[in-house]
């Protein structure tokens, strides 16, 4: 059974930083596109960052210049480095792995940014 396990969430003050990790198991990690999504209370889930199997990245406008997505294929792990955090970044952050019709999600990790 495929597993995506996120970690690294928590409470941080505005302006602070956090790094999220997502460890994947039971998939051929290197061929999957990986992404981080988030969902704030009462809002739709949105994709914040994506990294392809060839490590091309793209970001939502709201996080561009502040967040960095990266991957370590040797560790089957994708990261999200979040800097200059804002209260509006508060959400549950989800890891996603996608390859054609294969689409897997983690359980989510809470990020709370206090003002």
Image: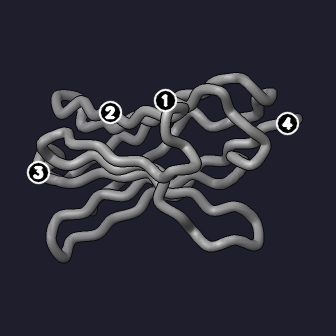
Residue contact between numbered discs 4 and 3, judged by CB atoms under 8 Å: no
Q: Residue at x 57, y 68 (%)?
A: 45
Q: Residue at x 49, y 29 (%)?
A: 81
Q: Residue at x 25, y 63 (%)?
A: 98
Tell me which numbered mark, 1 or 3, is placed earlier along the sequence. 3
Residue contact between numbered discs 2 and 3, judged by CB atoms under 8 Å: no
Task: Return the mark for residue 70.
Answer: 2
Residue 84 at what x, y percent from top left?
66, 27
Q: Residues within 10 Å of mark 4 (few under 14, many from 20)?
A: some
Tell me where residue 87 sits by quadrant: top right
Residue 73 at what x, y percent from top left?
18, 34
Q: Nearer the viewer, mark 4 or mark 3?
A: 4
What residue did someone put label 3 on? Answer: 31
Is 103 rendered above or below residue 55? below
**Distance from Cα at disc 2 to Cα at disc 4:** 26 Å
Tell me which numbered mark, 4 or 3, is placed earlier along the sequence. 3
Q: Is residue 82 left or right of residue 23?
A: right
Q: Residue furthest right?
A: 115
Residue 110 at what x, y percent from top left?
67, 47
């Amino acid at each position: 059974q495929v597993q995506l396990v996120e970690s690294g969430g928590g409470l941080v003050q505005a302006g602070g930083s956090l790094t999220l990790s997502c460890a994947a198991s039971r998939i051929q990690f290197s061929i999957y596109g990986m992404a981080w999504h988030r969902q704030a209370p009462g809002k739709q889930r949105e994709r914040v960052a994506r990294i392809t199997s060839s490590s091309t990245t793209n970001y939502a406008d709201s996080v561009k210049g502040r967040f960095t997505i990266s991957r370590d294929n040797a560790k089957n792990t994708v990261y999200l480095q979040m800097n200059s955090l804002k209260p509006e970044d508060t959400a549950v952050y989800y890891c996603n792995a996608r390859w054609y019709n294969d689409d897997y999600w983690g359980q989510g990790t809470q990020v709370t940014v206090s003002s």
